[in-house]
Each structure stands twice: as C-alpha cells, then as structure tokens.
Amino acid sequence: AQSVTQPDIHITVSEGASLELRCNYSYGATPYLFWYVQSPGQGLQLLLKYFSGDTLVQGIKGFEAEFKRSQSSFNLRKPSVHWSDAAEYFCAVIFPMNYGGSQGNLIFGKGTKLSVKP
Amino acid sequence: DAEITQSPRHKITETGRQVTLACHQTWNHNNMFWYRQDLGHGLRLIHYSYGVQDTNKGEVSDGYSVSRSNTEDLPLTLESAASSQTSVYFCASSGGSQETQYFGPGTRLLVL
C-alpha cells in the first residue's frame, strides 16, 4: 500500500539555525506532494506543494522543499528558524486517481514536532 | 473570503449518545473530507464525498456516517459514541480529487 514516512517524530533546533524535515513516500511514480503546518490547537495550514516542474518549490513563511525522484523524498527546509516556527509539520501525498484504490485521496505522514530553543 | 468552518469547536458527550459534527465550506468545492487526528497516528481519513449525494468510506469509517445533501455541508455523525472516538476531528475540502485540500479549525470531542 502507498505510504508516507516522516522518520523524525520530534526535532529540536536553536533559533536561527537551519532546519530540514524529512519525508519519504512509497510509490512507483510521482505523486502530488504537500507540506502542512499545525500550530498548537489550530487546524492545518498549507506551506507548499509540488505537482510538477521545478523540483525546488518555495512556500510561505520562508520554507522551501525539494523533490528528489531518485530518493522518493520531499524534504522541507528553512535556512533560519524563528521561535514562531515551533509547530507540528505534516507531509502528505496524493497518488493519482484509481491507483491502488486510493482514488486520489490525501495520505498523511505521522508528523514531526518541531521545538525551537531560544 | 471563502472559508471552511466546523461546529462545535469542543464537545463533551457520553458513551452511547449520537453526536453530529458540522462542517460548512463556502469555497463551492465538490470534494469534502473528514479526518480524525490522534497522537501517534497523524490524520486518518474517515469519510469523503466527491459531490452531492456521493459518500465514501475512508480508512477508519466504522462507527461514523456522513451525508451530502448540498455542496456546502458534510455533517459527520457518530451513531453511538464510544470512548475510542475521543479525538480531534478535521474537515477539509478541495476543488478536485488531485487538488489542494483546505482544512477547518477542528472539533475536539471527548467521549466519557
């Protein structure tokens, strides 16, 4: 079955340091790829998405993500983390319609919680 | 601005009671989804709808039902609430099956 893996459950970085959150998916072709952020007690906000084209995509709040087909990865990066970035981050994918019965639905990783040290 | 709202935002109920969570979107989106979020599981799909009168079961549909009588609303019903259904519930909508989903603020449900 298709799956999305976020190997890091919890990451702590210092304010001003760089950040990379990992995401891998299991699928033979390229799905549609998303990163969402969830602040405590809030809903999910879309950070960025990749459908096709340039493999480096820019999102809101200074985030970017790079799609690497050879590694089935879509890692999220930020060059300098701010205290307000502390949140939980979810990678999600949509596999093409009618592949394996998923019918184009969004499949989430289990999330990575980011803590920021002052 | 278009938006997606959920009500109530918090709900406490007792085991065995029927509970309905509301979801309303003004995006005019065809697709609507219900997820539950639990620690260690991320978000899991409960039910989804691709249009009026269309409903489909997701990964964790047992004990839940939905109905879609118009484009804007997809209420989620817990037929007989169980403690295992204590969770945070999110509604989402999208314009198409392979398009970005936009999420509501969530409903926190406690079943005692």
Image: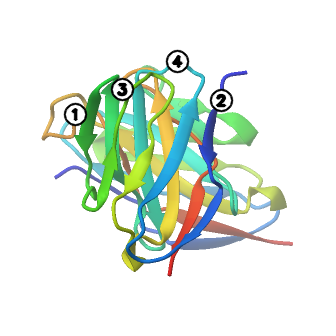
Dot placed on the residue nearer the N-terminal end, 3 or 4: 4
The residue under label 3 is B98
**Residue type, mark 3 in image:** Gln
The residue under label 1 is A103
Disc 4 crowd, CA 10 A, few/some/many (<14, 14-19, 20+): few
Disc 3 crowd, CA 10 A, few/some/many (<14, 14-19, 20+): some
Pointers 1 and 4 in contact (CB under 8 A)? no
Height in image: B60 above or below A25? below
The residue under label 2 is B3
Give the quarter of the figure containing the N terminus of chain B: top right
**Residue type, mark 1 in image:** Gln
Pointers 3 and 2 in contact (CB under 8 A)? no
Which one is in front in this view, the residue at disc 3 or the one at disc 2?
Answer: 2
The residue under label 4 is B28
Q: Work out how far the residue at label 3 is from the one at label 2, CA to CA, in angstroms.
A: 19 Å
- The verdict on a common chain for dots 1 and 2 is no
Observer-nearest of B50 and A106: B50
> Disc 4: which chain?
B
User: Which residue sits at x=74%, y=41%?
Assistant: A61
